[in-house]
Amino acid sequence: MAKIGFIGASGLMGHGMAKNLLAKGHQLSLTVHRNRERVADLLAAGATEAPSANALAAGNEIVFVCVTGSPQVEACVLSDDGLLGGAPKGLVIVDCSTSEPASTAVLRERCAASGVTFVDAPLSRTPVEAEAGRLNVMVGAEDAVFAKLEPVMRGFAENVLHVGGPGAGHTIKLLNNFIAQAVCTATAEAFAVGQRAGVDVRRLVELISAGPINNGLFQAMAKTLQGQMDGLKFELDNARKDLRYYTHLAESVAAPSVVGEAVHQSLCIASALGFGKKLVPSLVEAQEKLTGATLVPR
């Protein structure tokens, strides 16, 4: 069993991860910020509270960070009371956030200079799977580091994929999220165009459901036609952030990203229309506002 620290246990994904690590018998400590209610059960089950990230690093072998994105990860690691200030040599910091690869590279170098290993290990699936211990994790790490982390990660993940060396995890995650949001934005647009063209888009759902285009993301978006807006529990503004990271990645390797920019701008428009704090299926509501289509029963 490992001595594990956790930053972000009050989050939708982090809570389930921390709960499952604790249930597997690991010694868990965590930082607690504003939302104490979300970690009360973890503390009651035996987790301990660290007063700062600095103190969290000093007392553990591995620290998981599961926050919104690169600015938050950088603050966790590099701030005056951050992880690096209290990190003993040999500490492994695992970033499970969806972060920008360029930022990850800088953090990895800063950590290495202090004898600390920084690993990118973002997640896929939803908070439901996080609570059930059935996440997917894509790990960018050297072989020996992955061998150390894999048995620990299996405490909260069904699939732990070693996708390459340092940095590969966050790159693969951005590719994954680009494809996912392309499906969601295309579906929302198709529904609006179909309705404006005078067809019953429920017939489109029937067709796709019976063919090779069908997938879980399409079905989550199709549920909006029944008024269910939470089929995909992922905040639209977070999706917008991920696509921004993806377009930065494409630009950094001098690769054109025509579809990626279009998807990013679709999310930017939805956010500007006031749907940013809603979930991704609200792309359908944004299309209603843009086109005058009537899609979500009210």
Image (cartoon, grey):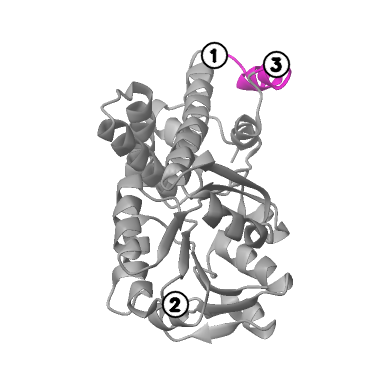
Q: Indicate which disc residue 198 carries.
A: 1
Q: Residues within 10 Å of mark 3 (few under 14, many from 20)?
A: few
- 262 lies above or below 30: above
Q: Give the residues in magenta.
A: 199-212
- Rendering coords of residue 83 (x, y %): 38, 73
Instruction: Quadrant for residue 18, please give it.
Output: bottom right
Q: Residues within 10 Å of mark 1 (few under 14, many from 20)?
A: few
Q: Amino acid at mark 1?
A: Gly
Q: Which residue is mark 3?
A: 211
The amino acid type, in three-letter code, at marker 3 is Gly
Q: Secondary structure under badge 3?
A: loop
As helix, strand or loop, the secondary structure at mark 1 comes to loop
Residue type at mark 2? Ala
| Picture layout, residue 260 above or below residue 141 | above
Q: Image quadrant of residue 75?
A: bottom left
Q: Residue at x 60, y 44 (%)?
A: 161
State which mark lies toward you, 1 or 3: 3
27 on left or right of 195: right
Comparing 115 with 248, the one in front is 115
Residue positioned 57% across, 44% down in the render: 162
Give the image location of residue 60, x and y in percent.
52, 77
Q: Which label sits on residue 79? A: none
- Name the residue: 67% across, 84% down: 46
